[in-house]
Amino acid sequence: MILQALVKHYEDLLEKGQIPQPGWGTEKVSFQLNIDSQGKLLDLVSLKREVDNGKKKVLVPRDIQVPQRVKRASGINANFLCDNSSYVFGIDEKGKPERSLQCFQAFRELHHQILDSIDSETARAILLFLDGWEPEKAKEYECVVSHWKDLMKGANILLYVEGISSVEDAKTRAGWQEHYENSDGDSDCICMVTGKRTKAAILHPIIKGIYGAQAMGTSLVSYNAPAFCSYGKEQGKNASVGEYAAAAYGAALNHLLNDREHVRSIGDTTVVCWAEGAEEKYQDAALAAFMGESDRNKISEDDIRAILKAALQGAPLDLKNVDLDMGRPFYILGLAPNAARLSVRFFYQDSFGNLLRNVARHYERMEIIRPAKDPFERLPAWKMLQETVNQNAKDKSPSPQMAADTLKAILSDSYYPDSLINGVMLRIRAEHKITRGRAATIKAFYLKNTNPKCPKEVLQMQLNEQSTNIPYNLGRLFAVLEHIQQEANSGINATIKDKYFNTAASTPSHIFPFLINLSQKHLKKIKEPNKKVYFEKNIQNIVEKLGEKFPDRMTLPEQGSFQLGYYHQTQKRYQKKEEK
């Protein structure tokens, strides 16, 4: 389904004129090789442009539409009109001059094969240049020597004739197109994407722009070892994907990854999305809702509220005077780097409205009382995942598999993975700290993955003083006892939370009698009578709901109730301070 969706997206982009036609692609080009009509070398000119990179400016190659690139493994395979110095000039510094000469000869033969029958000044000039060029004399040309360092790094060179790009010559373009369309050879498979009999793609396209992957790019589909092959088939013949489908899905995916405004990274996963019809407004709305971003892609916080409200109500969505079809098919793909190829973390497909509805339901579950200084109106997925990570660690990325499973759960409105709650609980035990994100995650997890030990009465947005749940009220009691200690010892650095929180949450009977006795000593230090009475009433009201004895042990869901009770009670205390 992934390849079919990408091929359909390619055809949508092609119809809108946003992507090159089959046989063409966008490549980073560093130099123009300018020759005259007689095939004489005139100049080698840099095409690099200056862009901002942080506080400094750097030179980067230009993106230019050129004939479809070949995929090279270890053999010699030339590109048409645009290639590196080994093919265009027959020179490099790899210590194998014989191979460089073979590369140049392959480049020359390809151009003769395509251009011999073309009646064009551009075609004739290119052939004259290639027939007259002597690789061993390359260093005699000042324009080549002056750019030698960049050329040796494999920079791409595009042929120009009399200052005009060779790809702009209509007859040369037509010659390439005929060569490309007639190079399929014998049909040897039924393409599993298009259903047509065609030639199987032996090598699939290189995909670039994946966070953490090789800079030169990686394949989504590849068979680079005999163990991956079956029935005596070699390489891509095992996949039964036609050359057209392979080129189309590669072009579409690279186009999506090159659009950095609509690419996001969560952990080690690079996320792209698209709607059928290739309209950007759908991407803007989906990413704004899913990532909780405002002011990016000109989406405001009011727009996000309107998107989520329309999704929950099943109402039509008007985003910046553009009507969005809630039934439009929508796709989200998560890719991560791997040793030999890309790894698909998740693939989601559904209607645009269902996607937004699932995300809105997730945000509803995540709603919890917010500290005054918290800048997030709603907690996006990446912020939620960060709550499972040690922020003092060198690598602050969440577990890749846990992140992928959590994203899938949000998008499909399915159960959250157990690894999510385990990660949050682990950080709470290690840091003795319950942030808004951790409390919200506990609440959302047990609202979706229901458990009687963490009932709905404790899974509220704010404090539920009517709850009779024992673990929840133990958490509330712990928060009150900590508050008493802080009032009695102004400026104290370490509280009972730093020493006894984990014990109180897991084995209450071992520590609460001691903590209550300790609180009586702290109460004696408080001089204001009103405060003493307030705290004593608080303790009495909570203890009345605990029964005759404290539990010996509490399960993980019960500990979640405890932590929510602690968070709710603490936030109520801060709210009162703000009100005053």
Image (cartoon, rainbow, N blue to C red):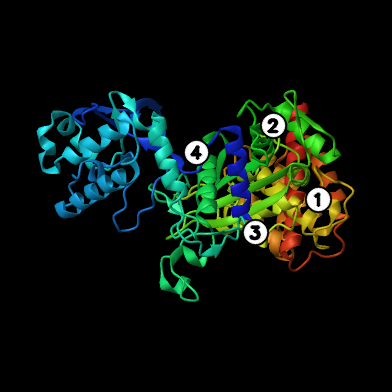
First of labels 3, 4 by sequence position:
4
Residue underneath mark 3 = 502
Q: Which quadrant, please, contains the N terminus?
A: bottom right
First of labels 1, 4 by sequence position:
4
The alpha-carbon separation of the residues under discs 1 and 4 comes to: 42 Å
Residue underneath mark 2 = 372
The answer to which image quadrant residue 114 occupies is: top left
Of tags 2 and 4, the one toward the viewer is 4
The alpha-carbon separation of the residues under discs 2 and 1 comes to: 21 Å
First of labels 2, 1 by sequence position:
2
Q: Which quadrant, please, contains the C terminus?
A: top right
The local crowd at label 1, few if under 14, some if 14 to 19, many if 20 or more residues have their Cα within 10 Å, is many
Of tags 2 and 1, the one toward the viewer is 1
Residue underneath mark 4 = 258
* Residue 55 in picture, x, y percent from top left: 38, 25
Residue underneath mark 1 = 459
Secondary element at image label 2: loop
Residue 232's mark? none
Secondary element at image label 3: helix
The answer to which image quadrant residue 554 occupies is: bottom right
Of tags 1 and 3, the one toward the viewer is 1
Q: Amino acid at mark 4?
A: Asn
Q: Amino acid at mark 2?
A: Ala
First of labels 2, 3 by sequence position:
2
Q: Is residue 520 visible?
A: no
Secondary element at image label 1: loop
Residues marked 2 and 1 touching at CB (< 8 Å) = no
Which residue is painted at 77% across and 36% down in the image? 325
Secondary element at image label 4: helix
Which residue is painted at 64% across and 33% down in the image? 280
The answer to which image quadrant residue 137 occupies is: top left
